[in-house]
Amino acid sequence: MTLGMSLGVALVGLEGRLVNVDVDIADGLPGYTLLGLPDTALTESRDRVRSALVNSQENWPNRKVTVSLSPAWLPKSGPGFDLPIAIALLSAQQSIPMEHSESVLYLGELALDGQIRAVRGVLPSLIAGYKAGIKSAVVPYANRLEAQLMVEMTIIPMRNLSELLRWLRTNEREEEQELPLVHDEPQGGDDFSDVAGQERARFAAEIAAVGGHHLLLIGPPGAGKTMIAQRLPSVLPPLSRDEVLEVTAIHSIAGGLTTRSPLASCAPFVAPHHTATRVAMVGGGGHYIRPGACSLAHRGVLFVDEAPECGVGVLDSLRQPLESGSITIARSIGSVTYPANFLLVLAANPCPCGNFSGRGRNCICTSIQVRRYLGKLSGPLMDRIDMRVEVEPLNRVELTQSNLGESSATIRSRVIAARAIAAERFKKYPWKLNAEISSRSLRIEFRLEKEAMNFLHNELDHEHISARGLHKVMRTSWSIADLALHPRPTLADTVKAYEMREGLNV
């Protein structure tokens, strides 16, 4: 028999589809033909597979070899098909048993010496294989931690082709010990106790962590805006297993698991530079649509420092994911939707020179320059920000005091308790956080106290806030009430939420 087959996965975004790799070895002039819409990296698999087989003391057929990747209409990309092609080719030569080639999923790139190298998108590929009924998968040893998250499948990590072929022929292999999820401390163990003073900004960060609210920090350089944003993930609750799967799958597709452990349950923190383009922020690409910064920050924090310095349209491109929690990228090769449910933190100076302050610091900017600078943050984007907090410059007393502020662990305990209250309240609803309450439910099931609603309606009548702003204040009021253990937001909770949204002194 000169026919062999194996199984691989083709990814389009986070969605995978099972691919049958069929190999036919026929008489004729020696040659190699690859069918099924392969890209350049996949077309080059012939030389990698040939060298890997020869250097692993296996035979390369000196005949006409035809490799078909079906379904043929589905575009295939990347070197991840090297391993299934090699297995199908050996199966066609009857060098390995057929049962292992037809019921096991293979993922991996082959080095010329037969080593099995890591590939991107292992976790979403395994999820696609499991949905198609596959129970076992061979993955590169370097991807073993990521693959172990898929506990429903039997994961077989392999270092090289020789080791894999020994298992296929003798059923002998080394057993790998499964590792539990770990809660890594983000940013090298940064703690909120490092932040001097800034009680208002610290309280705003706590509210943001409770309800998933977006935050704008405005203050002079050196006041602590970046420190607060970097420590925000340390007060967020650990991710659940399903959330870890989501986050790891996105980072696997983007190739970002070199800096983040696949088993980490801490919320991701992504801080693109203010010179980042719209493609870098939301995702895109020509031949391969990659996730952008807003998707890499899914279930975590997206921090944009020097927000007014961003290019035209970069921050406005975040308006869709801020509303829907996902981003759809359309290109000529197709459309891909990535999740993008993140907590946005923007930091900005009060003026171009950074010294504009109510304390009378030496500011050299004119009023027109100040308005033009902050005007770079568009009205529709600012309307989607829940809280706008002024970060005052620190004085000598605050910098020299020996009493540290509350630690991240203390704040996180309050955040977890407040989120537990919200989870109990929303157990019959599809959302989990206060920032996700639908507008209809805010008007019916989750109305504020009568005095609080009268206050907001009065502000709406005077056009001080928009309809979206009213709903934003109501959602923030629920987070403040959860922290204060109030069964329903009071007038005081609502006034505090309104003042934080308008950037007033609390």
Image (cartoon, rainbow, N blue to C red):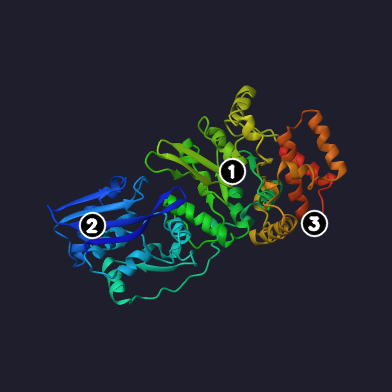
Res 51 label: none
Residue 215, x across and y down, in percent: 65, 43
Relative to 327, say whether 86 is above or below. below
Residue 399, x across and y down, in percent: 65, 50
- Residue at 53% x, 42% y is 327
- Residue at 41% x, 73% y is 176
Please identify the quarter of the rendering in which residue 96 is found: bottom left
* Residue picked out by circle 3: 485
* Residue picked out by circle 2: 24
Tell me the element at label 1. Answer: loop
Please state if 214 lies on the left or on the right of 449 as rendered.
Answer: left
Q: Residue furthest right?
A: 451
Q: Amino acid at mark 2?
A: Asp
Identify which residue, 64 or 197, lies in the foreground: 64
Q: Residues within 10 Å of mark 1 (few under 14, many from 20)?
A: few
Q: Specify the quadrant that holds the C terminus.
A: top right
Residue 436, x across and y down, in percent: 67, 47
Tell me the element at label 2. Answer: strand
Please state if 23 lies on the left or on the right of 389 as rendered.
Answer: left
- Residue at 52% x, 61% y is 264
**Disc 3 to disc 1, how far (Cα)?**
34 Å
Tell me the element at label 3. Answer: loop
Please state if 247 lies on the left or on the right of 480 as rendered.
Answer: left
Q: Is there any visible trace of residue 266 in the rendered image?
A: no
Q: Amino acid at mark 1?
A: Gly
Please state if 369 lies on the left or on the right of 251 as rendered.
Answer: right
